[in-house]
Amino acid sequence: MSQQKAIAVLTSGGDAPGMNAAFRAVVRTGINMGMKVYGIYRGFNGLLNKEVEEMNLRSVSEIIGNGGTKLYTARSEEFKTPEAQQRAADFCRSLGISGVVVIGGDGSFRGARALTNAGINCIGLPGTIDNDIACSEYTVGFDTAMNTALQMVDRIRDTAQSHDRCSIVEVMGRRCGDIALQTGIATGATAILVPEVKYNIERDVITRIINTQKTGKKHFIIVVAEGVGGVRDLAKYIEQRLDIEARATILGHVQRGGSPTLRDRVVASQMGYKAVELLKNNIGNRVVVMRDGKIADLDINEALEMKRVFDTELYKIAMTISI
C-alpha cells in the first residue's frame, strides 16, 4: 500500500494581507487532492525548529479575511547555510513531506530553491505588499496595501484642504515605487516621487506646485516612496521656498495590516491552488506568477534572474494629469 503524499506550507519574510487566503487554499486543495498538509510556523526558522502541525479543513476556517499570517513569519540567517538546508530537508523526509509551498518574496524564493536542491520540491508563491517581484506582474498583498494608503491619503487631504496646506506622504516601497505611483494617481497628487525615476526638487515638486497655484489651487498632496525618503526635509524646503505650510506623514506599517481586498483574496486562492497542483505532479523549483492577467508558473532560477521593469507609461500619465 502506497504512503499518502504529504506537502507543507510556510510564510516567510514580511507579512502581507492575503497570505492567510493563500495558506487556506493550499491546505484545502491539498486535502481535497488526497494529501496530508502540514503548516510550518515562523518560516524557514520554524522548519529548523520543527514547529510543524498537520492541518485539517477546519484549521483554516474563518481566516480568508484576516490580515497578517496565521502561520507567523520570521527571517532565518541560519537557513542560508548548507548544513541547515540539509537538516530541514531531512526533517521534511522524516514526516513524509515531499513538497513545500513557500509564500513570500525574493529572499523566500532563494530559500525555496535551496530546499529544492536539498531534495524537497518547493513552489514559490509571491506574497509581498511592494509588488517588487520581477517575475510576476502582481503580488499578493499589493492591492490591499494600495487601498489602505489610498484611504489614509484621502483623510490627510481633508485636513490639508481645510488648512491650505501641502501634505507630503511617505508610503512603503524601498526599491519599488508601485504603491506610490498608483496611490498618487488615485489621490490626484501634485507630485509623485519614486526610486526608479531620478527627481529634481525644483522641476518635479516646486514648479509643479507653483503651476497648480496659478490655477487657483491652495492645497497639495505629494506622495513619496519609502526608497526616496527625506519627507521631513522636503516639507521644510517647501515651507521655506514657497511660504506655505507643509507637513510630512510617514504611513509606515499600517499599510501591511488589515483585511485583504477581494482581489488579494481571489489571486491568493488561485495561486495557492496552482502551487498544490504542481506539487501533486511532483514538480518543484517553480514560482507561481501572474502573467498577462493569468496564473502561470516559471522556473525559479529564471524568475530570480529577471529584472523589474518600471511602468514608465503609467508614470507619464500621472505627471500629465496631476496638475
Image: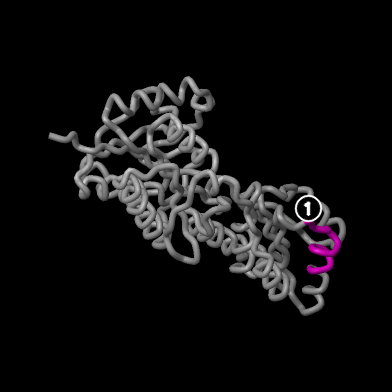
Q: Would you name the residue on which mark 1 appears? A: 234
The residue lying toward the viewer, choosing from 308 and 305, is 305
Residue sitting at the far bottom: 215
Task: Locate residue 220: give its quadrant.
Answer: bottom right
Name the residue: 60% across, 46% down.
Answer: 305
* Rendering coords of residue 167 (x, y %): 69, 59
On the rendered image, what quadrant is the C terminus found in?
bottom right
Up-down: is 173 above or below 163?
Answer: above
Residue 193 in the image, given as x and y percentages of width and height? 72, 58
Which kind of residue does numbered mark 1 sit on? Leu
Q: Quadrant of the N terminus?
A: top left
Front-most of residues 318 and 11? 11
Left or right, 217 with respect to 150, comes to right
Rendered position, 78 above or below 155: above
* 203 or 279, nearer to the observer: 279
Q: Is residue 159 visible?
A: no
Q: Residue at x 40, y 47 (%)?
A: 19
